[in-house]
């Protein structure tokens, strides 16, 4: 059975290093002015150069996203980005593919940088074998299928491609956020937040809470509210896709790449999803299901609730998220910190969430999960013993080193009731700020 590539998101260099470290075979990252996640990504050419050097050193792959639907003025940015890629090419540094959805950009990149492999982004909404054949004919080496294609459809698509002798790589999403429109083809975010989803700036306005009103023709201005509950309705709000328990079902499709969504998310997410899917894929190859530990791991990131997307056909109401939880926190765990240094018998932890004496932590290494109750720890600079550490300004604490723990390992905190209440308040405030 063909082993698919595990392709993970990398919103910046740190996330890239984390995803590779935790098991990703390949990562996708943005080109600043041309990517669907343009608000993050590299600020300078040095980051891209470092990223390409790193993937070469590790024998991994990087795909660069240039998958916006470009207005005419955006074409000016393309030349700059291509000049930069040409300079890197001359140094022997090339990405392994460029993700494009706009036919105009596809054509221009092909003309100006013919050595670059072109992948058709999910934003092109490819749903059938004829569309794949079309892009292949134009020179694409890989097509990322729309998330709306089911496993049964993929089976037919693969058979049709084989029959026509069309050899092109197929990539599919197996995990991550969904979109109520066809992958970003939506103007809701432009309308509500003046942020264009088609240019990489979606504000996820479909997830906001909305109140609906009826207005009777004869009584203009009298609005009758239609409410699902006291929080309004989140009728456009989709749960997240998660296929970790179903990988053995889709292995026979012999897809080339299984993709995880989430370049906006934290290094904690990058570590957890890369580790969970790495191990789940390796187990699936041995025809084994994911372990309970892996299922708990994938549940320990912030999620809006999981479902299987369109893999088993068109989803119904189970795909929607009706509860008031906004999905910005997890009920059981939170990201606690990153191991920044291990020297002798001391390890330094960059604090990412308030930590205090007695907290129950898990150190997640690429191969292990080590439990720890926070006992004595010191201020990272003054070396004074402290009982509470708050995140901010890369604040660090020092702890006794633990065997097997290395720089780059991630810590999560098991939440207690009082932490959960604080997190709920934080989310409420954030939601109000976004909506105002
Ligand atoms: S606002 Fe929602 S539906 Fe629109 S592009 Fe963003 S995620 Fe998709």
Image (cartoon, rainbow, N blue to C red):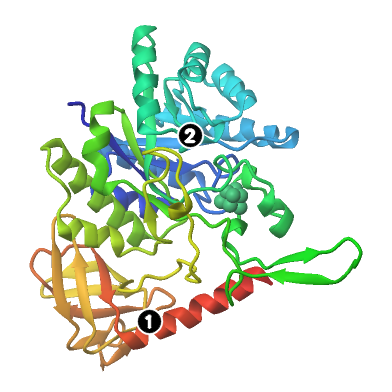
| Labelled disc at residue 432 | none
Say which element carries label 1: helix
- Answer few, some or many: residues within 10 Å of disc 1's Cα (few below 14, many 20 plus, some between 14 and 19): some
- Answer few, some or many: residues within 10 Å of disc 2's Cα (few below 14, many 20 plus, some between 14 and 19): many
Where is residue 144 shown, x and y percent of the image? 44, 31
Residue that lies at the very extreme toward the top in this rendered image: 164
Q: Quadrant of residue 347?
A: bottom left
Where is residue 18 shown, x and y percent of the image? 30, 54
Q: Is residue 291 above or below residue 54?
A: below
Say which element carries label 2: loop
Q: Is residue 283 above or below residue 296?
A: above
Using the image as rendered, state which of residue 136 and residue 118 is in the foreground: 136
Asked if residue 82 shows in the view, the reply is yes
Where is residue 165 shown, x and y percent of the image? 36, 7
Compared across the picture, whether 252 is left or right of 305 comes to left
Residue on which the image places disc 1: 420
Where is residue 434 shown, x and y percent of the image? 62, 69
Q: Quadrant of residue 391?
A: bottom left
**Quadrant of the drawing holding the C terminus:** bottom right
User: Residue sitting at 7 percent across and 68 percent down?
Assistant: 403
Q: Is residue 99 above or below residue 167?
A: below
Distance between the Cα atoms at labels 2 and 1? 36 Å
**Quadrant of the drawing holding the N terminus:** top left
Residue that lies at the very extreme toward the left in this rendered image: 403
User: Residue sitting at 45 percent across and 68 percent down?
Assistant: 328
Using the image as rendered, state which of residue 331 and residue 353 is in the foreground: 331
Residue on which the image places disc 2: 146
């Amino acid at each position: 059975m063909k082993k698919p590539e595990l392709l993970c998101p990398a919103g910046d260099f740190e996330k890239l290093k984390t995803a590779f470290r935790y098991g990703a075979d390949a990562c996708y990252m943005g080109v600043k002015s041309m990517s669907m996640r343009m608000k993050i990504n590299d600020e300078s050419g040095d980051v891209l150069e470092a990223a390409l050097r790193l993937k070469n050193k590790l024998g991994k792959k990087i795909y660069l996203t240039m998958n916006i639907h470009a207005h005419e003025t955006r074409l000016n940015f393309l030349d700059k980005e291509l000049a930069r890629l040409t300079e890197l090419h001359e140094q022997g540094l090339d990405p392994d593919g460029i993700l494009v959805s706009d036919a105009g950009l596809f054509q221009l990149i092909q003309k100006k940088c013919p050595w670059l492999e072109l992948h058709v982004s999910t934003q092109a909404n490819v749903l059938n074998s004829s569309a794949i054949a079309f892009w292949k004919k134009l020179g694409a080496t890989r097509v990322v299928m729309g998330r709306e294609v089911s496993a049964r459809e993929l089976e037919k698509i693969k058979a049709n491609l084989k029959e026509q002798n069309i050899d092109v790589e197929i990539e599919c999403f197996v995990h991550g956020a969904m979109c109520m429109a066809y992958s970003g083809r939506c103007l809701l975010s432009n309308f509500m937040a003046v942020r264009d989803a088609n240019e990489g700036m979606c504000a996820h306005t479909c997830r906001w809470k909305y109140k609906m009103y009826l207005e009777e023709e004869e009584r203009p201005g009298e609005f009758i509210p239609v409410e699902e509950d006291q929080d309004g309705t989140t009728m456009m709000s989709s749960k997240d896709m998660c296929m970790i328990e179903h990988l053995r079902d889709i292995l026979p499709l012999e897809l080339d790449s299984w993709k995880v969504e989430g370049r906006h998310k934290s290094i904690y997410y990058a570590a957890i999803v890369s580790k969970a899917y790495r191990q789940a894929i390796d187990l699936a190859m041995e025809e084994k299901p994911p372990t309970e530990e892996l299922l708990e791991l994938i549940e320990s990131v912030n999620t809006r609730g999981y479902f299987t997307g369109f893999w088993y056909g068109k989803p119904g109401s189970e795909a929607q998220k009706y509860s008031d939880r906004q999905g910005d926190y997890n009920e059981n765990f939170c990201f606690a910190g990153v191991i920044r240094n291990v020297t002798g018998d001391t390890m330094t932890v960059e604090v990412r969430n308030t930590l205090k004496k007695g907290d129950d932590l898990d150190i997640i290494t690429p191969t292990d999960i080590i439990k720890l109750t926070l006992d004595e720890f010191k201020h990272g600079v003054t070396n004074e013993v402290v009982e509470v550490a708050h995140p901010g300004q890369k604040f660090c604490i020092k702890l006794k080193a633990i065997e097997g723990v290395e720089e780059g390992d991630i810590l999560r905190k098991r939440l207690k009731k009082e932490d959960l209440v604080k997190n709920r308040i934080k989310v409420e405030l954030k939601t109000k700020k976004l909506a105002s």
